[in-house]
Image (cartoon, rainbow, N blue to C red):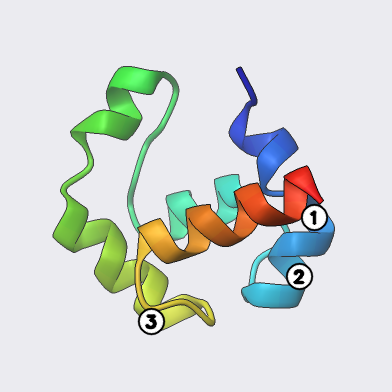
Amino acid sequence: MISFTELFTSDFMRHYTQYESIDELLSSGGFVVNSEEDYEAIPDEAIDAHVRKTTNFLSWKEMLTKAVDAYTH
C-alpha cells in the first residue's frame, strides 16, 4: 500500500497545487487525516470543493488519478 506522502510527492504538489505537501493541503481545508478511517470520513463534496479552489484539479478523484498516473510512470 502506498502512503499519501509517497503518492503526492513534493514535486507533484508544487506543480499542481499551492502547497508543498498533501498534509498542508488537507490541513488547510480543515481535514484531519491520521488514518484511513479519517480519510474515508471526509465528505466528497467538502474535499472536492477544497481541491477545486486550491489546485489545478476539478475534484479529489481527478487529483488522485493524476498522482497515481505520475507515480506509476
Q: Name the side, left or right, on which 7 lies relative to 39.
A: right
Query: Are circles 2 and 1 on residues that touch, CB within 8 Å?
Result: yes
Amino acid of disc 3: Lys
The residue shown at (26%, 31%) is 40
Tag 2, which secondary structure?
helix
Lower position in the chain sequence, tag 2 or tag 3: 2
SS class, disc 3: helix
- Note whether 40 is above or below 51 in the view shown: above
Tag count: 3
Q: Which residue is mark 2?
A: 14
Q: Tell me residue 70's x, y (percent).
A: 74, 56
**Are there few (<14), some (14-19), or many (20+) residues within 10 Å of tag 3?**
few
Residue 21 visible in rendering? no
The residue shown at (74%, 35%) is: 6
Is residue 1 visible in the rendered image? The answer is: yes
From the viewer's perspective, tell me whether residue 72 is left or right of residue 49.
right
Task: Identify residue type, mark 2.
Answer: Arg
> For mark 3, what is the residue?
53
The foreground one among 8 and 69 is 69
Neighbourhood count class around disc 2 (C-alpha, 10 Å): few under 14, some 14–19, many 20 upward = some
Residue at image position (76%, 70%) is 14
Q: Which of the two discs, 1 and 3, labels the residue nearer the N terminus?
A: 1
Asked if marks 1 and 3 touch (Cβ < 8 Å), the reply is no
Query: Which quarter of the figure has residue 69?
Result: bottom right
Q: Is residue 5 above or below residue 56?
A: above
x and y percent of residue 27 in the render?
Answer: 45, 50
Question: Which residue is labeled 1 in the image?
Answer: 10
Cα distance, mark 2 to mark 1?
A: 6 Å
Q: Nearer the viewer, residue 34 or 9?
A: 9
Q: CA distance from mark 2 to mark 3?
A: 15 Å
Q: Amino acid at mark 1?
A: Ser
